[in-house]
Image (cartoon, grey):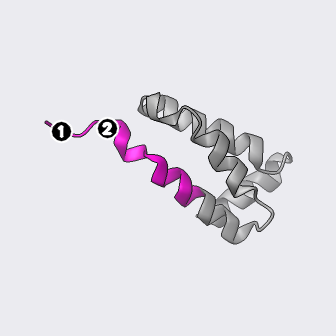
């Protein structure tokens, strides 16, 4: 049986996001992002996992949208 598609967006992806953002924005609260981002994560389906991580980023990135976008782009 094939592995569920949601497993392609597993906890390791959240950890990678935290690592990449921390490299370009040292003040990023990676531990807090992971704590809220992975809370209840296993039970979520693929789309809800993506939304949950987006909400966690919104809660932990700088409030200024332009600064937050620049951090995300730089982390790519």
Camera-side residue of 72 and 20: 20
User: Residue at the right extreme?
Assistant: 64
Instruction: Name which quarter of the figure residue 42 lies in.
Output: top left
Which residue corresponds to the image point at 46% horizontal and 54% vertical from the top-left?
A: 12
Camera-side residue of 67 and 28: 28
Tell me the tag on residue 2: 1
- List x then y, in percent, for residue 65: 80, 46
**Distance in Å between CA atoms under marks 1 and 2:** 9 Å
- List x then y, in percent, for residue 39: 59, 36
Q: Which residue is mark 2?
A: 5
Instruction: Name which quarter of the figure residue 59 lies in.
Output: top right
Position of residue 51 in the picture relative to residue 36 (left or right)? left
Compared with 40, 11 (above or below) is below
Secondary element type, mark 2: helix
Q: Quadrant of the N terminus?
A: top left
Q: Are marks 1 and 2 in contact (CB under 8 Å)?
A: no
Which residue corresponds to the image point at 86% horizontal and 48% vertical from the top-left?
A: 64
What secondary structure do most residues of the magenta stretch adopt? helix
In magenta, the rendered stretch is: 1-17
Tell me the tag on residue 61: none
Position of residue 53 in the picture relative to residue 5 (left or right)? right
């Amino acid at each position: 049986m094939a592995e569920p598609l949601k497993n392609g967006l597993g906890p390791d992806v959240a950890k990678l996001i935290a690592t990449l953002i921390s490299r370009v924005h040292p003040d990023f609260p990676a531990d807090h992002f992971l704590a809220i981002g992975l809370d209840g994560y296993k039970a979520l389906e693929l789309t809800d996992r993506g939304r949950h991580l987006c909400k966690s980023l919104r809660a932990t990135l700088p409030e200024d949208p332009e600064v937050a976008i620049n951090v995300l782009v730089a982390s790519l």
